[in-house]
Image (cartoon, helix red, strand yellow):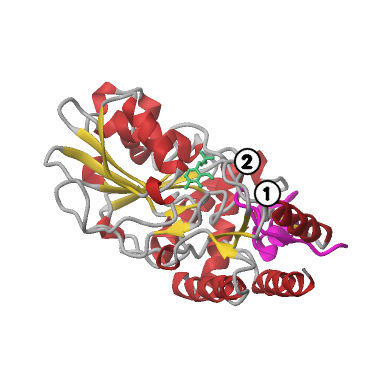
Amino acid sequence: MTTVYNFNAGPSALPKQVLERAQAELTNFNGTGMSVMELSHRSKEYEAVHQHAINLLKELYNIPDQYKVLFLQGGASLQFSMIPLQFLKEGKIGNYILTGSWSEKALNEAKLIGETAIAATTKDTQYKTIPNATHLQLNENDAYLHLTSNNTIYGTQWANFPEITHAPLIADMSSDILSRPIDIEKFGLIYAGAQKNLGPSGVTVAIIREDLLEENVDQIPTVLRYKTHADANSLYHTPPTFSIYMLDQVLTWVKEQGGVEAIQKMNEEKAKLIYDAIDESSGFYKGHAEKDARSLMNITFNLPTEEDNKKFLAKAKELGFIGLNGHRSVGGCRASTYNAVPLEACLALRDLMDSYRKNN
Ligand SMILES: Cc1ncc(COP(=O)(O)O)c(C=O)c1O
């Protein structure tokens, strides 16, 4: 079989061990004689998987008791709407920090629902930077402050989050959830589509502080209320059972790696290989993000010309490197080094970058 190095930005690489386990259980899950996909979501066998995934995420991410873990559908994109629907009441402001296309999309959905503001933006640097967390335009009637913890397209990531007390901090962590330890108590709500660090697409994880569940609930459709899903332990309607089963398997794998701190160390090591290849290339490779804003998850760079980018990407593809194209909106190159991307893939990319530079 050909070796491929999967640097896809999402859906993205899953741990090989997880895929092999899922394959082994595919036609006979836990002695049931059927696949987990064929079980009722009300069966004790499925409910055990569901609860195990919730408990394990709480354990691995150190989630305090006053937070609920929810499994939702509609992707992170539906959260862009669910958040203002629930929290953006008359007289309140949905305040957004813009660090890239995903935060712009979140803001645009909120604009359809209520009053919004921009607490900070780094658009004038082509989103190469992250704003200073202590220089934000805050309002006393903010309903919340929203940020994107990792900017999948531009390759920047928050190192230190704003410390605010006047309103809940809400974070889209779609592309860096569970990649490093986080102080959950700084946030009112964290959400993430699973398809980068947590499993396959189909399930969206939300971690919400319990006191926020009650806000504004009478005004919105039942299925769009966080409280509906919290009260039903994310079994209000049929959940994406196979995605949650895979999420549970990925969490088990994270635990086997030594937990989130061990994962962070590996992520730092992997990203360093590629950033070093950029920094030691005498300008042949040019990173998009400023050094202090660099993401450990999405590494964005360009070669001297667009033609060079194309040639490099074609050579990489020929050698089995998948998903190195930059997002269609910005071009260039992007290596996504999520939790499940193995060190060997990053070593291989580093070697390719070094040899390609020497030969060109
Ligand atoms: C940071 C971020 N937010 C939101 C999204 C959208 O997620 P979904 O496709 O699950 O709606 C993405 C997808 O890549 C993302 O990277």
Number of residues whose C-alpha sits closer than 10 Å to that of mark 1, classed few (under 14), some (14–19) or many (20 or more): few
What is the quadrant of residue 57 in the picture? Answer: bottom left
Q: Which residue is mark 1?
A: 32
Query: Closer to the N terminus: mark 2 or mark 1?
Result: 1
Asked whether the residues under the numbered discs 2 and 1 touch, taking CB atoms below 8 Å apart as contact, a structural biologist would say: yes
Any mark on residue 39, and which?
2
Ligand 1 under 8 Å from disc 1 Cβ:
no
Query: Cα distance, mark 2 to mark 1?
Result: 9 Å
Residue drawn at 50 percent across, 56 percent down: 155
Residue drawn at 49 percent across, 76 percent down: 265
Does the image show residue 213? no
Q: Would residue 257 appear left or right of 100 to someone viewing this image?
A: right
Name the spot of residue 103 as percent of width and height, x first.
40, 42
Q: Would residue 2 appear left or right of 273 to someone viewing this image?
A: right
Range covered by the magenta-colored residues: 1-29
Does the image show residue 160? yes
- Which one is nearer the viewer's eye here, 339 or 39? 339
Q: Amino acid at mark 2?
A: Leu
Secondary structure category for the residue under label 1:
loop
Number of residues whose C-alpha sits closer than 10 Å to that of mark 2, classed few (under 14), some (14–19) or many (20 or more): some
Name the spot of residue 159 as percent of width and height, x first.
36, 65
